[in-house]
């Protein structure tokens, strides 16, 4: 069965450094998402991406964040200058053609900012 | 704003016990409702869904009924197994937007043999 993959599974970085989290969505999907979960808290929506542009973003997704689909298969989340409070599990998700809302999630990347 | 509230965990049950995980929501409009499950080391997987009031979603022995009058979508299973141990997330989404999901905080279920 097709699945969403994410790399790395765990990333440790120092405050102020840039990180790029990578995702490979399911190949025929058209909608892409990033969510995050700070330890012990809710899974929160960050951003959605469709037709090569951001379709919606939350207030968490400030200028330090960006997303890209550089080559038609990968979907990346970049954090330009990490803060301690960016430490969280980041989940990528993708959804099939049309808004059926069956989002398929990757296993997540645990980001630790020290 | 739109939100989802789940019962606090962890929930610890013996095998074959009856499971209920409560979920209530606040939303303007008519959302679709979902239960996702996360097994250790894996991503969130869709367990079941309901798209309108009085719909019942079911899968793998789990079921939940969309109750508009009580704004609830409680998850139930008649007889849990050790393999059901996981974190369960209730979520809502709308058909008129990008399909973002709004999640509850998750409930950890531990089933003991």
Image (cartoon, coloured by chain):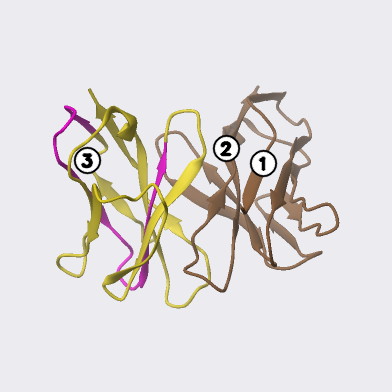
Chain colours: A yellow, B brown
Q: Is residue A23 magenta?
A: yes
Report the disc number at residue B105.
2
Q: Which of the two labelled residues, at mark 1 and mark 2, occupies the earlier sequence position?
A: 1
Q: Is residue A110 magenta?
A: no
Q: Position of residue A38 (x, y in %)?
A: 42, 33
Report the disc number at residue B70.
none
- Which image quadrant is residue B112 in? top right
Is residue A67 depicted above or below A31 in this figure? above
Helix, strand or loop under label 2: loop
Report the side of B111 relative to A90 (left or right).
right
Q: Nearer the viewer, residue B69 or B22?
A: B69
Disc 3 marks which residue? A8
Q: CA distance from mark 1 to mark 3?
A: 31 Å
Tags 2 and 3 both on a single chain: no
Whether residue A107 appears in this view of the structure is: no
Subunit under mark 2:
B
Q: Nearer the viewer, residue B111 or B105?
A: B105
Helix, strand or loop under label 3: loop
Crowd around label 2: few <14 · some 14–19 · many ≥20 (10 Å): many
Q: Are marks 2 and 3 in contact (CB under 8 Å)?
A: no
Residue at image position (18%, 39%) is A81
Q: Position of residue A108 (x, y in %)?
A: 35, 42
Is residue A100 depicted above or below A110 in this figure? below
Q: Position of residue B44 (x, y in %)?
A: 47, 47
Q: Are marks 1 and 2 in contact (CB under 8 Å)?
A: yes
Q: Position of residue A104 (x, y in %)?
A: 44, 58
Write down the region rendered in magenta.
A11-37
Crowd around label 3: few <14 · some 14–19 · many ≥20 (10 Å): some
Report the disc number at residue B5.
1
């Amino acid at each position: 069965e097709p699945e969403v993959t994410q790399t790395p599974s765990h990333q440790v970085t120092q405050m102020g450094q840039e990180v790029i989290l990578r995702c490979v969505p399911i190949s025929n999907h058209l909608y892409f998402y990033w969510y995050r979960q700070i330890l012990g808290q809710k899974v929160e929506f960050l951003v959605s991406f469709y037709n090569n542009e951001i379709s919606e973003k939350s207030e968490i997704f400030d200028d330090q964040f960006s997303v890209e689909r550089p080559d038609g298969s990968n979907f990346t989340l970049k954090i330009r200058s990490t803060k301690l409070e960016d430490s969280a599990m980041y989940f990528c998700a993708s959804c099939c053609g049309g808004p059926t809302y069956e989002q398929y999630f990757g296993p997540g990347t645990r980001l630790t900012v020290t | 704003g739109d939100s989802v509230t789940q019962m606090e965990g962890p929930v610890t049950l013996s095998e074959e016990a009856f499971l209920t995980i409560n979920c209530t929501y606040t939303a303007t409009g008519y959302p679709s409702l979902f239960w996702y499950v996360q097994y250790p080391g894996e991503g969130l997987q869709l367990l079941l869904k309901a798209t309108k009031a009085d719909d019942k979603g079911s899968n793998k022995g789990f079921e939940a009924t969309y109750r508009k009058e009580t704004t609830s979508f409680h998850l139930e299973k008649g007889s849990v197994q050790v393999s059901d141990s996981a974190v369960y997330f209730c979520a809502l989404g709308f058909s008129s937007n990008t399909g973002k999901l709004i999640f509850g905080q998750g409930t950890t279920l531990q089933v003991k043999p």
